[in-house]
Amino acid sequence: MTVTAMAREDLVYGSASDGELLRRYHEDGDVRARQALIERHIGFVRRLAQRYAHRGETIDDLTQVGCVGLIKAIDRFDGQYKVTLATYAAPNVLGEIKRHFRDKGWSVRVPRDVQELNVKLGRVVDELTGKLGRSPSVEELAQATESTTEQVVEALDSSRAYNTVSLSTPTGGDDSDEDGADPLEHLGDEDQGYELAEERQLLREGFKELGERERKILHMRFFLGMTQSEIAEQIGISQMHVSRLIRQSIDDVRERLDVDEEPQPQLAAAGCRPPRRTRARARGRVSRGKPAAASTRAA
């Protein structure tokens, strides 16, 4: 098709009325007439989309959504209707935009009745604010919308589910390192229990050599924080006896741990470092204040 023919065709479709283009599309199957109708009414769709410009979506995106409603209106329009295409298409365009906000605009899915009440509350709040000269209360909003106070609170709170913020969004507005850092860097903390897990496992091995009474005494003394007098009263022995049992039990546990480390010279001869667990035991003995001379008993 030459440029002259294309220009002549554009002139023909451009000068035709909406009714003529609709007749050509529905009766003759002229897809070009349908396209001409869509292009002619894009400005109309854009004006309708501007009503929702404050809802967080761009005008271009809303115009595209509204064009879906326009196309549906063109496809369903009956020439026998005594209304113009724009009048018939307006509810379809607005309905498509509202459906977009209802189904795809919310970051977190909320029930439809809550969404509808949230939209209704937006209009009621503006009306009551102008009428009362102040912000309306929850009870006044419930009365105006014929809802309960619980439903109003739920609908108002649901507005926070419309937009979400990434956890990686900087919390500060300036360029400072502290305020502009990733919030994930400030969440959580090191669990101190990990440092104690290995030592508890070592103690579990050493406690196997103790009797039930000795284990009970050590548990009350070092885990429950009881004094020797309290332990003596509960066990039914003297405080001096409790003190002697605690010292003896600690020595027995240390000896058990030392025995477990005796095979280590073979590793040293092979040029290998002892396992982490063994090194932790050694550190544990030093931290407990064991004399240096006592640590050479295994050797």
Image: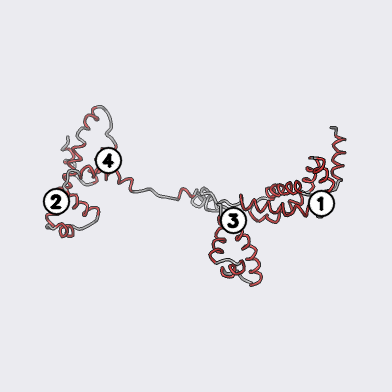
Q: Where is residue 139, by image quadrant?
A: bottom right
- What whole-number distance in Å separates the C-alpha atoms at marks 1 and 4? 91 Å
Q: Nearer the viewer, mark 1 or mark 2?
A: 1
Q: Earlier in the sequence, mark 1 or mark 4?
A: 1
Dots 1, 4 in contact, CB < 8 A: no
Residue 245, label in figure = 2
Q: Residue at x 16, y 44 (%)?
A: 252
Dots 3, 1 in contact, CB < 8 A: no
Q: Earlier in the sequence, mark 4 or mark 3?
A: 3
Q: Residue at x 53, y 49 (%)?
A: 166
- What whole-number distance in Å separates the C-alpha atoms at marks 1 and 2? 105 Å
Residue 112, label in figure = 3
Name the residue that disc number 1 marks. Answer: 80
- What whole-number distance in Å separates the C-alpha atoms at marks 3 and 2? 70 Å
Q: Earlier in the sequence, mark 1 or mark 2?
A: 1
- What whole-number distance in Å separates the C-alpha atoms at marks 3 and 1? 35 Å
Amino acid on which disc 1 is placed? Gln
**How many badges with numbers are in the image?**
4
Q: Residue at x 55, y 63 (%)?
A: 151
- What whole-number distance in Å separates the C-alpha atoms at marks 4 and 3? 59 Å
Amino acid on which disc 2 is placed? Leu
Q: Earlier in the sequence, mark 3 or mark 2?
A: 3
Q: Position of residue 275 (x, y in %)?
A: 28, 35
